[in-house]
Amino acid sequence: MHYRNVGQTGLSASVIGIGLERVDTKPLEKVEEVIHCALDHGVNIMDMFMPGQEIRGNIGKALTGRRDKVLLQGAIGSVDLNLQYDISRDLDICKRYFEEMLRCLKTDYIDFGMLFYLDTHEAIDEMIHNGVVEYARQLKREGKIRAIGASLHNPETGLRLVNENMVDMMMFSINPAFDMMTGAAISPEELLDDQFADRAVSVDPRRAELYRLCQNRGVGITVMKSLAAGKLLSADHSPFSQAMTPAQCIHYALNRPAVASVLVGCESRGQVEEAVRYLDLSDEERDYSQVINRFRDDGKSGFAGSCVYCNHCLPCPAEIDVAAVNKLLDIASLDKNNIPAALVSQYQSLKSHGSDCLECGSCEERCPFSVEVIEKMAGAAALFGR
């Protein structure tokens, strides 16, 4: 395993990390399988934004005797007050969930205390006004967190957090589809330029600016959504002319300025081993330049509006699991005339369906990827019959 400094935090992270959201709702045995396999391969950084007591308790049990071997990213503001994933900026609620996280994990500190989901300036202002940011600073002074981080998808808010010295590091969504402007031509030389020279006009300039600023200010970046929820691994869903491999996606993210670690969501030993296999591959096997230099020619090269199943759109007043519905819809849409019975059964077993959508629009306001959720729920209802 290779390790990199996480900015100027004094902490060193494995270049391959694990996002533990995929083991949420899984039994303890599966949580232990993933965590133990990762640790055995030298992985030492894991993200656990999930607010549920059961998953936090299972992670704590899996880390028994090995807590000192891992850097944990723990969210400040991720809650499940209504038994559905949600976000809170209320100071008392944030305190309660953070202290509960420490109890469930049976630890007295979190390595990176992550101010959760700061994709709008209003969210940042609210956390400042309500005292949540100062609470994070207090936790750092007390040693309950070792560094202050933030999770976000918006480069504009990322630039503000760094310029106002609010964070020591951040978790940011990085992959070539998110970085590139739709359909723009780009050369392999430009894409392999770690510093994103100004001539590389096909890279979103604000994202490029954020990476450079983090590098210059010593703010480390850990990466989420490097595979775009697996869509970059599918020729049908990728904006490029062919599918990428997990190694190519990881390599792309690791070549961005300030990036310390790429956190890959895993739910099995095999997936952990596939992620760390990146280290054994040749430069040719990791090379992504020829893939992302060729956009699709069928008019579907854009990635904006594509769901990556993060469920940041929740809570839903109709209790729809939007990510689950969209995932099943995407799979079924590959061949609408031959939808597998198992897929239909899986959709029917959901607690709520596309037809339950109230069209309130709260999901679309919260979505960081501009997904037209209402339209997709109607599409799912039409395709699956409810």
Image (cartoon, grey):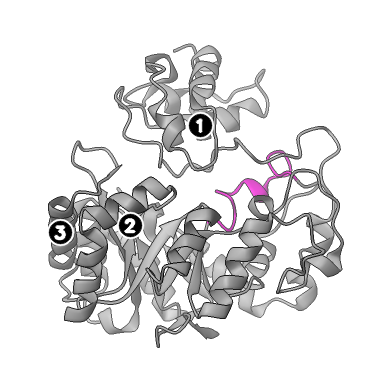
Q: Is residue 24 visible?
A: no
Q: Please, what is the three-letter code of the amino acid marked with disc 3?
A: Lys
Q: Nearer the viewer, residue 215 or 295?
A: 215
- Would you name the residue on which mark 1 appears? 326
1 or 3: mark nearer the eye: 3
Which secondary structure is most common in the magenta stretch? loop
Horizontal arrangement in the rendering, residue 340 relative to residue 347 (left or right): right
Which callout, 1 or 2, points to the residue nearer the camera?
Answer: 2
For image coordinates 64% across by 70% down, the residue present is 256
**Disc 1: CA contacts within 10 A as few (<14), some (14-19) or many (>=20):** many
Earlier residue among tags 1 and 2: 2
What is the crowding at mark 2: few (fewer than 14 residues within 10 Å), some, or many (at least 20)? many
Can you give x and y, in whole percent of width and height, for residue 323 in the image?
45, 36
Identify the residue at horizontal 21%, vertical 53% (top origin): 130
Alpha-carbon distance for marks 1 and 3? Answer: 33 Å
Quarter of the image where one finds residue 194: bottom right
Residue 227 covered by magenta stretch: yes
Q: Measuring 15% from the left and 59% from the top, which residue is drawn there? A: 95
Callout 1 amino acid: Asn
User: Which residue lies under the disc numbered 2?
Assistant: 49
Looking at the rendering, the stretch of residues picked out in magenta corresponds to 225-239
